[in-house]
Amino acid sequence: MKPRSLLPGRLGGRADSSNDSEHVTPPHQRYNSKRKSNAQQRQSQLPTHHQSEHRVTRHIHPDGESGRRGIDPWRFLKICFISNCTAAKWVNLLWPTVPAAIALHFIFGSSKQRSAHLAVFILNWIAMLPSANLLSFAGDGLARKLPKVYGVIVETTLGSVVEIVLFMTLLVKHDKAKGDNYIPFIRDAILGSILANLLLCLGLCFFFGGLRRKEQEFHESVSEVGSALLLVAGMALVVPSTFYAATAGKEGGENAAVDSLRISRLTSVVLVVAFLVFLWFQTHTHHGIFDDVLVQDEEKDDDRHRDLARDKLTFTECLTAVLFSLVCVSLIAVFLVLEIKPLVYDYSVPEVFIGVILIPLAEKAAGHISAIDEAWDNQMNFALAHILGSTIQTALFNGPLVVLVGWILKKPMDLDFQIFMSAMLILAILVVGNFLRDGKSNYLEGSLCVVVYIVVAIVTWYLPAIH
């Protein structure tokens, strides 16, 4: 008897020659079968939006998959109104103030009535809230379609667009010869934005997140990198003002103002480079660490099943919402800036209070709502990434950028902050860094941060402006 081959029909003898046609597959059929099997295997490995059973689009992250293409006007409006949390939905009820604020500017903007200017400022300040909220929501929808780290960066950047638009509007309108001295407002708004993020927003995140849990934990890779960068940025920002305070009015300090302006410009270049290094660190060399942290944070989301099942904007709808909100934000920013002088001279509202408190609250409100909602859902790493990321972007990029643009436009924009405000900035960074050190938070720490911010707001009402 011939030995039975381990590979029938190949190198050895056949087990049953009468069944060759059943056991031997032609080469071209084996090749086609293998291709089909590989394709099916690849298809089975693709992520799917299991809650909504949407078909996944290539290059779109499953969490941001809408299952649609193009623009559906009615659905687009419905999704934008519902937004991503209850607080944002309530803010969307303010949308009627947007056309009203724009119309009121053109009707009463040139009026000499004091009450008219106050009404225009208040209405435009309120209108900034839903406009910035739409930009934040569209940025969030766009971010969900990207990998985690890139998504956070895109969302933070879009949130900072409102700030950049306000800064640039104030800078372009600055003309000291005509009495339009807006540079102090920009300096105050830079510090006010950082303080609002670190004290008010972070404090509210700790407070509302702590109401539902005894403690909340966050990863050291988010908190340590963020707090270290903030301390470095804070030190760099206060160097020009410290230099000016140390040399002005003293022997050899005749050119203190000019030298302070030069130091501010050179420091701004260095800070922008530092911001680019931070971006490279976060998106290339160490992105795996942040990806893992944020993915784990998503698994702790109490509302994750509802977020995944909720209707989402398409990529086209996200871009449409971003462009529309940018137009609204830009118009409202211009109208706000034009009403600052009447508010200061007719109603004696302190300039420092407007720059440090009012302007940052309007342009940061939407981002604050998103971060607080994440803390409420036990996503503290996401909340910290947004808060610290936005603060770092203001300190390392937005502030220095307006200095560099002022250099190009030949306007004396510098970083010569008041010594008192510089001290408040450094102290706020140290306080927040101390709270972040142990990687845990509770409502007591949050309430303390908010208390400090309220104290700063009270002081700015009485702090005289220094030009």
Image (spheres, rainbow, N blue to C red):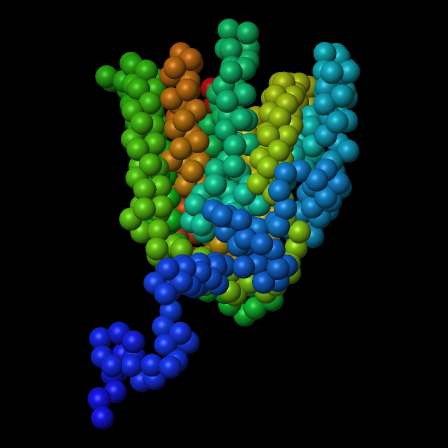
Residue 342 point in image, percent of width and height: 66, 18
Instruction: Using the rendered image of the protein, determine whether residue 410 is visible from the camera's viewpoint.
Output: yes
Q: Is 86 placed left or right of 207 in the picture?
A: right
Q: How many marks?
A: 0
Query: Looking at the image, which residue is at 63% across and 46% down?
Result: 68
Q: Quadrant of the N terminus?
A: bottom left
Outermost residue toward the bottom in this view: 1
Q: Is 117 placed left or right of 135 in the picture?
A: right
Query: Looking at the image, which residue is at 34% across and 19% down?
Result: 261
- The relative height of residue 145 versus residue 292 in the rendered view (above or below) is above
Query: Looking at the image, which residue is at 53% across and 21% down?
Result: 170
Outermost residue toward the front in this view: 18
Residue 233 point in image, percent of width and height: 35, 39
Instruction: Using the rendered image of the protein, determine whether residue 462 is visible from the camera's viewpoint.
Output: no
Q: Is 22 placed left or right of 460 in the picture?
A: left
- The relative height of residue 3 versus residue 343 in the rendered view (above or below) is below
- The relative height of residue 387 versus residue 51 in the rendered view (above or below) is above
Residue 423 point in image, percent of width and height: 40, 39
Q: Is 64 placed left or right of 466 in the picture?
A: right
Query: Looking at the image, which residue is at 29% across and 48% down?
Result: 285
- The residue closer to the viewer here, 439 or 370, is 370
Residue 398 sits in which quadrant?
top left
Residue 140 sits in which quadrant?
top right
Residue 227 point in image, percent of width and height: 37, 49
Outermost residue toward the top in this view: 177
- The relative height of residue 296 versus residue 86 in the rendered view (above or below) is below
- The residue closer to the viewer here, 251 or 146, is 146
